[in-house]
Amino acid sequence: MLIQSLKNHKHQFFKLKKSNGMKIVIGLLSLTCCLVVLTSLSGPYIPDKGIEPAIAFFKIEAAGFAKATDELMQAIDSIERNNPVNLRKAREALKKCRLHYKRIEFFLDYFFSTAAVIYNAPAKYEIEEPYMEFQEPIGLQVIEGLLYEKNPYAKKEELKQQADAINSSATDLGSLLYSFHADDSKLLESIRIHLLKVITLGITGFDAPFLKSGMEEAEVSLVTMHHILAPFLDGGSPTAVAVDTLFKKSIEYLQINTNFDTADRLSFLKTYALPLQYQLSLLIKELGLYLDTGNGIVNYEARDIFSKDALNITVFAEKNDWRKKEELIELGKQLFFETGLSGNNKISCATCHRPENYFSEPQPKSIAFDGHSFVQRNAPTLFYAGYQHEQFWDGRAKSLEEQVKTVINNPQEMNGSVALNTLTARLPGYANSFKEVFGKEEDSLLSGDKVAYAIAAYIRELNPRDSRFDRYLHGEENLLTAAEKRGFNLFMGKAQCGTCHFAPLFNGLVPPFYNLSELEVLGTLETDDLGKPRLDKDRGRVEIFPMDFYERAFKTPTVRNVSVTAPYMHNGAFRTLDSVVEFYNKGGAAGLGLSINNQTMSSTPLNLSGQEVRDVVSFLHSLKDSCSYMGDRIKVATK
């Protein structure tokens, strides 16, 4: 039975506790721990023209959401065995509840992020780095997963507990506003962030993969944001008119493209959403209400999230000292190809991360230091490797610098610990370069840290973002084929690729703040023979941290340049992109009938047709970078 203290307005933060094998929600912290009191950066709170109407809107819509959660409880309570009508009504009640939630999500996410976790946390354990954070399954997404199981009636008690927990909290949402203060700059930042969330997550169905209500939820979110912005759009400036017009056209487009599986997301982004993101940014500056309280990763100055400068790569570095950037990168390039860093003077970073293969290994696994055995895992592309909060397939390194030192020292790889200890003697030709980059005193001495720092700086330059897809989004028409366009829409929709390979880098960097990277449990196979599937024996991250949900967990890599970086997966077992997409299409290992209890991707088949699989693969080909801008920074010309 659900602990009654949930119904007390003093409890707004939760933990999960096991009872009779089921997870239930109990009160953890008092309301005072959850209230976020925000004051104007400029001094005493002054009622602005936007924030007060927004607060009033939140009060009204929070009440509507609470009512919808009550109706959801009743619908779930009416579920009966072998009664598809009542089950359908419960699913419809869930959809209605989610649409109500989308009217207040922008406000909750920004001003009361702790409370927001209660309603829309992932349906399964989400493994996120770099803080070893994981979210307990709770809320609307959990209810969706349970309602779409083979026998939802068997989960009725758990469903009731989840619904009761949401309802108990939703009833007291208004109490969050006690002593609440904010200003228009914060309000506009919340809108800016939420628009980015719609662009990168909302239209992918990230929150509701079974209901497939993503396009409708995106529409509700845009309608809400447009309403909240109304006080700022009445000035008649060209920018305000542009924002108003783009919101209206975006909403109209989504009202037409409601079918999740067939919606044209590419046209939505290119024609409406990305221009809207740009114009909204201009409007905020025009109003003098620019505010950036983020972590420095998202660049609000960028035109849109698909612009090359949208994410600040220097935030991922161990140091942000770029005073001699060009010299440092050039030194890093030389060291990347330097065999003197290895124990036998034969191996460099480029031995396994081959430039002609877009800095990847064309074999399943690289030959080890001994010359006849193989290393543990495949060497993936280094393109965009700098945009990650962890390195290696199991995420054991927290930076590129740490990864470089680990590889050089690894006896199986470069076995270069002796080389690092005798760098000055082994690499006398680098003395002048080190002095130029690091100074003339003791800081200029050759060391493993400086080698790693320089190589990491070079690797961070491997982010051209000049694929045909990128250039098409920003105005170069006729660069994508019809199949590639269909493939993008499938990737971000029916195929659910975009719910793990997040835009714009299509890796595990999680929007809208990009402050976490996901690891996933797919149940990767030993081979790409889906007719005779066998689980790969590599246990992944659990060997670093022995926690159950880390079993077979691996980093989500970028799929940019994936068409020229075969083979695939951590073990290099999949030889073609068609086999990879078909593996996902079947529902991963669990969908193929293998026993894997903690698989994070859905085991439900995607039901992609053969043509749809080919279309997704076609889109992936459009992500190949031309690398023309790189010039001589790439020593060997790429394919």
Image (cartoon, grey):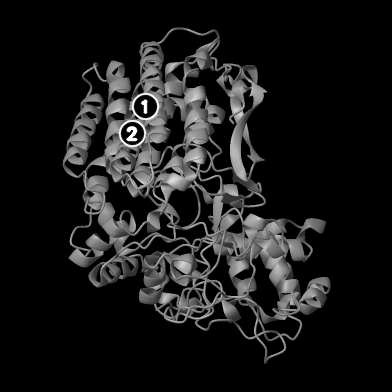
**Three-letter amino acid code of the residue under disc 2:** Ala
Label 1 near label 2: C-beta < 8 Å? yes
Q: Which residue is mark 1?
A: 71
Q: Quick one: SS at disc 2?
A: helix
Indicate the secondary structure of the residue bearing disc 1: helix
Q: CA distance from mark 2 to mark 1?
A: 7 Å
Picture quadrant of residue 233:
top left
Q: Amino acid at mark 1?
A: Glu
In the rendered structure, find residue 93 and report the number of the disc placed on it: 2
Q: Is residue 453 visible?
A: no
Decide: is 494 above or below 419.
above
Q: Earlier in the sequence, mark 2 or mark 1?
A: 1
Quarter holding the N terminus is top right
Task: Point out residue 486 in the picture as x, y percentages from the top left corner.
Answer: 23, 61
Dot 2: within a 10 Å radius of its alpha carbon, few (fewer than 14), some, or many (20 or more) residues? many
Q: Residue furthest front?
A: 81
Note whether 554 is above or below 80 in the view shown: below
Q: Residue at x 40, y 52 (%)?
A: 503
